[in-house]
Image (cartoon, grey):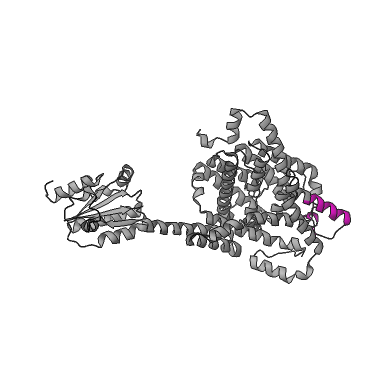
Amino acid sequence: MQKEFIPKLFSLLKQGISKETLIKDILSGLIVGIVALPLAIAFAIASGVSPEKGIITAVIAGLVISVFGGSRVQIGGPTGAFIVIVYGIVQEYGVNGLTIATFMAGFIIIIMGFAKLGNYLKFIPYSLIVGFTSGIALIIFSSQINDFLGLNISNVPADFIDKWIAYFNNFDNINWYAIAIATVTILITLYFQKLIPKIPGSIIAILLATLVVQYFNIPVATIESNYGEIPSSISMPSIPKVDFEIIKALIQPAFAIAILGSIESLLSAVVSDSMIGGKHRSNMELIAQGAANAFGALFGGIPATGAIARTATNVKNGGRTPIAGIVHALALLAIMLLFAPYAKLIPMSCLAGILIVVAYHMSEWRQFKSILKGNKTDVIILLTTFFLTVIFDLIIAIEIGIVLASLMFMKRMSESIHIKNITSETKTGEHLFDEELSDLPKEVLLYEINGPLFFGAARQFQETITAFNKDYKVIILRMRYVPMIDATGFQSLKEIIKTFKEEGILIILSGISPDLRADFRKNDIYSVIERKYIVTNITMAISRAKKHLNIEE
């Protein structure tokens, strides 16, 4: 088996893990498990599903990701990035539809891993990632205003604008107790760890808010009042009812979950690599992420991926092997089995405060501001993705964002190709220093092409080459700086050769690299030009031209 398809844990166990490292991993895993608890509950509720599904996801998916993943320190589980997609699926197709979409997404990610697409996801533009991440952050913030203000709107609209209209129409119902609890939660979550670094502020905020609400019988909504009891056990896995129609309906959301989960997990792995000086196995990480989603879905879990904040917490607390992630999952399982009945008492406004902090950290407003000062292309991609995410739909935003980024890239690549008429420059004295060109016959026209000859640049190439005085008898295309030619480029090249052949003009291709020669064979270029007129350097090209013109050397 190739090394890139071996889980990191297996490699580390083979090398041996020291007792000191093991102790640090266990302690770090316990801390991360405590940090993950409120987030798992909050993400589940914000996604429109019951609280225990978030914990189940963190336990099952987190365990699979740590055991089979390609990163030393990755912590997996539900994340804020999925809230928008999951909420939309649940509203339209129900929890059963979400299970099917998550299961499908899992297999899509596994296929991406085995196809080694983990090596290519890093090419997705940063401006696109910041655009939809910032959009998600704004949506998460907006979704928590109901609980933050204690408005008790039973059916909050899913649409961003309709949601805010509903809030403004219900401002008369503001609960000042809820606002106070949410505000204190935000302050504790943000600043408590500055006092005691090892204890997460979110846990302190939950304990304090729950105790105060219960002791003083404060009239605010709780998990119990909105969702009832939280099960203290994990149900047996079950396969959902599936038919072809629902698969067709959910294939688009499944791909969105797969792409978003893959991007976020690999980003998290890259960030953790920089923190520990390691190197993750991206394709194995994708396979583990896919397996975690497919397996977690059978237990009723929601989509999961690598969580940047929890992974960073793991590293900062001394975690250095996947054992920390395994302990984190087992700690969450123990908490669920022992303390689930008490979790139902958590105030909704407290969870809203925690999610608002999550949204703030997700917003990446500094990076957003920085990109706005950058080049025009990045600004267009950033703002388009951001507004599509907020106003319309995350799936549409990702699709259009990737297409837009690709089009922008192709435009810039097409502009990068330069076609010089070296013959005219030589006559004006600009290339007299080039001894190779000093004896260029007057009947020979020499063009030098710089840049990739692909479909975006093919038309410019064809128009430039054909727009000249037809007095020349030989044209040399110097292609030493052409790194690649795609099918459209080859088609344009063939058409140029055929056109000039009909007019009695010979084309000679110079500076062809071995890689391009292989592509020439595959694209049947030899059907329109003889092999002897495809040469490796300009000296040979001029020699072939002289021989064709019967000029003695």
Please state the extent of the stretch shown in magenta in the rendering: 205-230
The answer to whether 11 is drawn above or below residue 269 in the figure is above
Residue 222 colored in magenta in the image = yes
Residue 232 percent location from the top left of the image: 77, 45
Left or right of 58, for residue 526 = left
Number of disc labels: 0
Residue at screen point 20% across, 55% down:
501
Residue 280 percent location from the top left of the image: 55, 40
Left or right of 472, for residue 52 = right
Front residue of 293/510: it is 510
Q: Note whether residue 361 is visible.
A: yes
Residue at screen point 79% across, 53% down:
346
Magenta span dominant secondary structure: helix
The answer to whether 13 is drawn above or below residue 83 in the figure is above
Residue 209 colored in magenta in the image = yes
The answer to whether 283 is drawn above or below residue 159 in the figure is above
Front residue of 253/212: it is 212
Left or right of 134, for residue 213 = right
Residue 200 percent location from the top left of the image: 73, 46
Residue 235's image quarter? top right
The answer to whether 256 is drawn above or below residue 516 in the figure is below
Front residue of 99/221: it is 221
Residue 450 percent location from the top left of the image: 33, 53
Q: Note whether residue 48 is visible.
A: no
